[in-house]
Image (tube, rainbow, N blue to C red):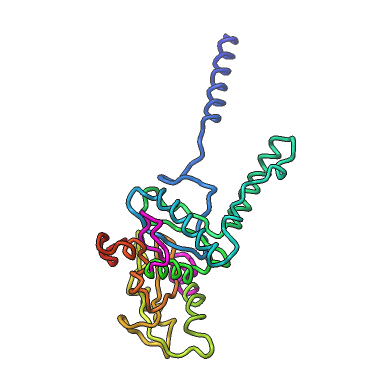
Amino acid sequence: MEETRKRKSDGTSGQGANARKTKKPWQMPGKKFSSGPSIHPGDAGIWATCDMHREGQCTAELKDLFNDYATLIYGNTAASSAAVLDDAQLGSDDIEAAINQEMQSLQNFKQEALFVPVKIDRNALVLFFKTREPVEPVSFVHRVCSDAISKVTSQTTRYVKRLTPMTQMGKATGKSLEEVAKAVLAPVFHQDGVSAQKYAIRTTIRNNDTMKRDEVIKRVADLVGEPHTVDLKNYDRLILVDVYRMILGMSVVGGDYEKLKRFNIAEIYEPSSTADASKTP
């Protein structure tokens, strides 16, 4: 009898141990924890749209395009930031220490790279590249599209559609909208000596039910204030507000936005075979 009880006790104990070993941490449905880069308030970057199921090819095209232009514009190549790790950096005989050192070097590279792709959603038609100084998203994208429309460069992308520069990112809330707007609008509209300008506001809201287009436009217009006036067709400046899920971004572009096909590279290179720019995602 005592031996039987002992066997039952051992069996129960074993099952409990196995259950603890196989137990998995709880995760949000449909979400996976990742140590990859993400978008934070205060970040700057560039949204890009692409063909369906071509996110990987689009990301590769943009990496090459952005790095080439970084070399052209800023002189210090993005390729230098992407230098392969030197074997001398991994001189330790301790394998674990060498791996940790390499992982730290990779992390430092992510922080130093001029352009860092951020995964948004699987099978999403929108991509985001975080940027760091000296890259200024608005002037950078304007240069890319100006060269394309002037035929200074030949087409090197196949799956990239529209590029949307974001001077500053924030959370998709009313409070954050105001904070981002003040930071982005001040250098353009509120500096000493700035003359009255005509402006328009264009919003893009995806997968978000809390931010309403009319409310966003009114808040931003109030922050622009006088002596600037609204002109939807002949504007000097266009304020872009882009909301995706719980993220928002803002930038101010010039009056040639329509001439540059709303920064739609595919439309610039192949206007006859590409859908109207206003209908492209």
- Which residue is painted at 54% across and 89% down in the image? 192
Classify residue 150 as left or right of residue 4.
left
Classify residue 108 as left or right of residue 280.
right
Asked if the magenta segment contains residue 139, the reply would be: no
Q: Is residue 72 above or below residue 18?
A: below
Who is closer to the viewer here, 201 or 41?
A: 201
Who is closer to the viewer here, 113 or 167?
A: 113
- Which residue is painted at 29% across and 66% down in the image? 277
Q: Quadrant of residue 99?
A: top right
Residue 273: image location, x then y, percent? 25, 59
Residue 75: image location, x then y, percent? 58, 65
Q: Is residue 104 above or below residue 190?
A: above
Q: Is residue 178 above or below residue 111?
A: below
Quadrant showing the C terminus: bottom left
- Which residue is painted at 30% across and 81% down in the image? 233
Q: Which residues are magenta?
A: 151-179
Residue 66: image location, x then y, percent? 49, 60
Asked if the magenta segment contains residue 173, the reply would be: yes
Residue 129: image location, x then y, percent? 48, 58
Who is closer to the viewer here, 16 or 252?
A: 252
